[in-house]
Image (spheres, rainbow, N blue to C red):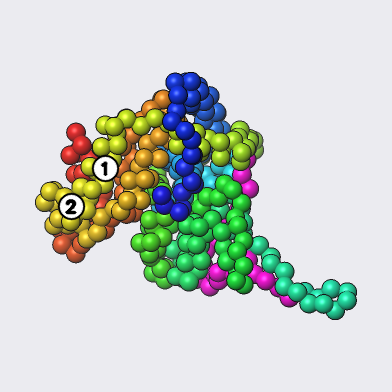
Amino acid sequence: MSPDLPPPLTAAVPTAADADAVLQSIEVLGGQLRRVREGVGRIIYGQTEVIDQTLISLLSGGHLLLVGLPGLAKTKLVDTLGTVLGLDARRVQFTPDLMPADILGSEVLEEDDSGRRSFRFIPGPVFAQLLMADEINRASPRTQSALLQSMQEYHVSVGGKRHDLPRPFHVLATQNPLEQEGTYPLPEAQLDRFLLQVDVSYPDEAAERQMMIVTTSSAQPTPQAVLTADDLMAAQALIRRVPMGDSVVEAILRLVRAGRPSSTDIEEVRKHVHWGPGPRASQALMLACRARAALQGRLAPSVDDVVALAPPVLRHRMAVNFTARAEGTTVDDIIRRLVAKLA
């Protein structure tokens, strides 16, 4: 099991009564999640799919990378989620001069009344339940690597001492696809730690009209708490108990393995893919499919969930080679080809 995902539940072989209890709990969770979606939807307009995929990532216990142009409510979405889910949310604006201590915290030397000196640790903004890393690719590789430890191990090391992060802990990072000069591309190891990469697009005309009217009026809606941090962690534990059919497991396995040039019979993949998704992609798809089913009020995931979640799970875990770029083939093109093979 990947260290950046919460540990699985350990239990005896489930009985019929256990299965009934899980199904009843899933139904209750579905009602709670409907209220969460409604609460976020009153603040964020025209981004239903983005909201759903963000909630899927949080329910799965993972981190999320939001990629989109400025002004598409990425920051507002994170602020709203912090309130609706009852989480302690903080925001860090990543810049080239940001240092690891600005995120993790640092030790300061203090002297008491008796003249005795000692170091005291002052926690940084990473000690939050929901951390927004705004424009994460503007920070130097050194700072990015400091955040990687937090995402992977759920603790930080400062001055040789370990400091555990609060639970739950989620990183929601944003990245601007424009203005790439002076930025530092995220290394593959860090990209792999994000459960999903969600591409944020422009809202449709009706949503933009509603947004324009509401946000420029004197009375703007404010988010209200629906869940607590304990509720979210209970939901994350329940998601891992959602039953998964063999057909869905096989679809996930076939999809991920077909994306690797060394283990596929798809000529386009062998020709155009530089490196494919690793086992963490399979784990992410398993959890995300369970979460999507619960979010939509279903008691078990289907192959349709695999198809819907393949792009956000795989697009940051694959890379095309020079031949593909020269021919205009993108990662999303490859993923569509892989998904078509599931039919």
- Residue drawn at (56%, 59%) of the image: 155
Q: Which of the two discs, 2 and 1, labels the residue nearer the N terminus?
A: 1
Q: Is residue 336 left or right of residue 118?
A: left
Where disc 2 sits, the SS reads helix
- Residue drawn at (56%, 40%) of the image: 233
Residue 186 at what x, y percent from top left? 39, 63
Residue lying farthest bottom? Answer: 115
Residue 87 at what x, y percent from top left? 61, 44
Q: Nearer the viewer, residue 242 or 52?
A: 242
Query: Considering the image in quadrants, where does the C terminus appear?
Result: top left
- Amino acid type of disc 2? Ser
Disc 2 to disc 1: CB gap under 8 Å? no
- Residue drawn at (22%, 60%) of the image: 274
Magenta span contains residue 187: no
Asked whether residue 204 is in view, the answer is no
Q: Is residue 46 left or right of residue 98?
A: left
What label does residue 253 carry, if any?
Answer: 1
- Residue drawn at (34%, 54%) of the image: 316
Residue lying farthest right? Answer: 113
Q: Is residue 1 above or below residue 141?
A: above
Residue 278 at what x, y percent from top left? 30, 53
Residue 47 at what x, y percent from top left? 44, 39
Magenta span contains residue 104: yes
- Amino acid type of disc 1? Leu
Where disc 1 sits, the SS reads helix
Q: Which residues are magenta?
A: 86-109
Q: Is residue 206 above or below residue 4?
A: above
Q: Is residue 203 left or right of residue 257?
A: right
Q: Residues within 10 Å of mark 2 (few under 14, many from 20)?
A: few
Q: Residues within 10 Å of mark 1 (few under 14, many from 20)?
A: some
Figure disc tally: 2
The residue under label 2 is 263
